[in-house]
Image (cartoon, helix red, strand yellow):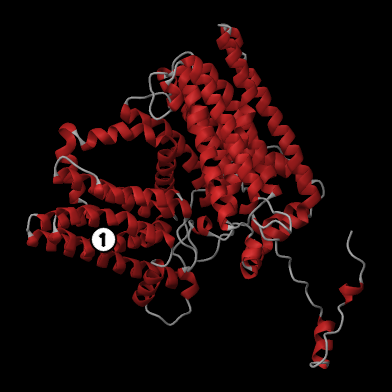
Amino acid sequence: MAGGAGAVGTALLGLADYATPEAGFGVLALAQLLWSLGWALGPLVTGGDATLRPAWFAMVPMRPRGLAVGLLGAAFVGVTPLLALVAFGGLLLYGARQGPAAALVAVPAVLLQLLFVVLLAKVMPQVLGGVLRHRFGWELSALLVGLVMACLNSGWFALGFLARLGGGDWAAGTATALRALPSGWTVVAVDAARRADWVTAAAALGGLAGVCGLLLTAWAALLARQLVRGGGRRARPVAARVGRRLLPDTPAGAVLGKELLLWRRDPRRARFLRTAFWTGVFTALLPLLDGYDVLLPWAGVVAALFAGAFCVNLYGLDAGALWLTLVVPGAARADVRARQAAWLLVTAPVALLLTLAALPVAPGAVRPWVFAVLPAVLGAAAGLIPLMSVSAAAPSPDRPGGGPLDDLADESAEHVRAQGLAAFWLQLPAALPAAGVVLAGTLLSSAPLRWAGVPAGLLTGALCTWALGRSARRRLEARGPELLDVLHRGLRPTLQGAADAGPAATGLSRGRSVAVGLLTTGGVLLVAPQGLVALAMTLFVPSARGWFLALYLPKAVGIPLAVAFILLGALGLRAAHVLNRPGDPGDPGRAAPATRPRRRSWDHDRAAARHPGGPPPPRPSDHRPEAR
């Protein structure tokens, strides 16, 4: 839905009125660059399209170039390429307004631009799949994903900076840089056709076609390397030296040492922590492009929130190794507590370091808030990670020959993303008691009461860690075999059964799907930016208005409006959750969930073979009384 709105909005740029044709082509070149970056960096977040994995064709007698061409053709089937074609159609609309020649050149230009971005989306996962097997690749991938996540968090603060880039003294240099990039060569071709400069137009289109050919050749070479070598050489991370004398000689100490080693050696775990770190850093730094330092003190809190959201599928990373814990009596308690302690040891120092680094520029009134909220958020995350992982784990196996990005496009990836989003929002209520103490001290102008929020945050975090960890331990003891069965078999049988059953298993009708999407999007926008962020900025930085509605009103009205937005967004999210639940069998908006077919026994199949023309013999289960 958001992609469709963005595509239509980009296409409408071709119908806007600009002061000069050069200004219009500059805006279109910027839009082309943003879409190209989105296609190139999108696989870093989603893992790419997992419909056709290249590893499935390892035994097919086909040359890598032919396989690349076939997979490229299949990549154009779907909604996403159609949205990109609509977005690039803005160049065609603008070229039609400039004359028949520009419109004629815009047709192959739009098609080449679509081919260029699709090839980028295919090549980037293959390139990063090899790079990510080294420590430098871990950092590079985490930095890029953190930058993308930060743009979603605080990218609106940089809109003023982007506007200054497109106007004023920097306009000429920005336009030249945009047109020099391959993403802007289609704009150069259409602009040259408007001026009847056919040599430049042909050179621009030919250059982009050559770049597409190079990308296709590189993709074929990368596919050949992956199919022949099985994904390339694995990384050889330096072994973490855990002081054995510092760890107790107990089961908990053994698990703690193992977890500390895994947090450094496992590429997936390392990527989670590094991505959370860079997300916090860039979320705080992006507003500086427009002169705002309001988020600098909160870098550590943001990093802690995302670390808790990214690591929520902790038991899913172990796959079948969970049986080592289940076969030892009483090992569940030591396992859960040691995992909590290891996560805090690798996350809390980084979050605290980011917070302390911003203290010189942090206002004095903000410091009690930060130091009160940070321990509460860390404690809530340390409790939610094992609890949610045990309650709804999704297997994330490390396949031979696969890449570190494969788990982002796995069949359980959507489940893990939803789980992480829920963990992100569930951490925030843990900060309310400590924030309430600081707020009371602020309203009463009492410095000791404001700083009393720090021990309140510590107490809340410790309580959340203990209580949620206790629930995780009990659940692991009670449902450990079921969890091991899920980690062993995976989610594919359930998903495949739902797909075979059709719409009756998927559940939501088209109208309800649209309603759930609108309510979820609107709820998140009202709760987060227009609610929580606007409330914080109204209290601390009322001059930085941005796109927050509450900041354009007097403080006496803006604060209640921000609170109302939070409540309204929460109601929207609740309504989306209610609509997304399985309905009654007679509900016309949702079909009844499909039931799993009964497994016929071997005796029943043999009896059916004896009587091929008659009715099927009764199954043994048909004579059993109904289950209570």
Q: Tell me if residue 344 can be seen.
A: no
Residue that protrudes farthest toward the top in the picture: 445
Side of 350 where 16 appears, left or right: left
Image quarter hosting the C terminus: bottom right
Q: Quadrant of residue 483?
A: bottom right
Q: Quadrant of residue 399?
A: bottom right
Image spot of residue 310 (x, y percent): 55, 44
Q: Secondary structure at mark 1?
A: helix
Image spot of residue 392 (x, y percent): 68, 50
Above/below status of 285 relative to 82: above
Q: Nearer the viewer, residue 586 or 289?
A: 586
Within 10 Å of disc 1 (Cα), the crowding (few <14, some 14-19, many 20+) is many
Residue at (82% x, 49% y) in the render: 329
Above/below status of 101 relative to 572: below
Q: Quadrant of residue 387?
A: top right
Residue at (17% x, 37% y) in the render: 171
Q: Which residue is mark 1?
A: 110
Residue at (41% x, 52% y) in the render: 4
Above/below status of 441 relative to 580: above
Q: Tell me if residue 387 can be seen.
A: yes
Image spot of residue 162 (x, y percent): 28, 36
Q: Nearer the viewer, residue 396 or 76?
A: 76
Number of on-image labels: 1
Which amino acid is tagged 1? Val
Side of 502 where 279 appears, left or right: left
Residue at (56% x, 26% y) in the render: 564
Side of 375 where 139 appears, left or right: left
Q: Nearer the viewer, residue 627 or 153?
A: 627
Side of 291 where 583 appears, left or right: right
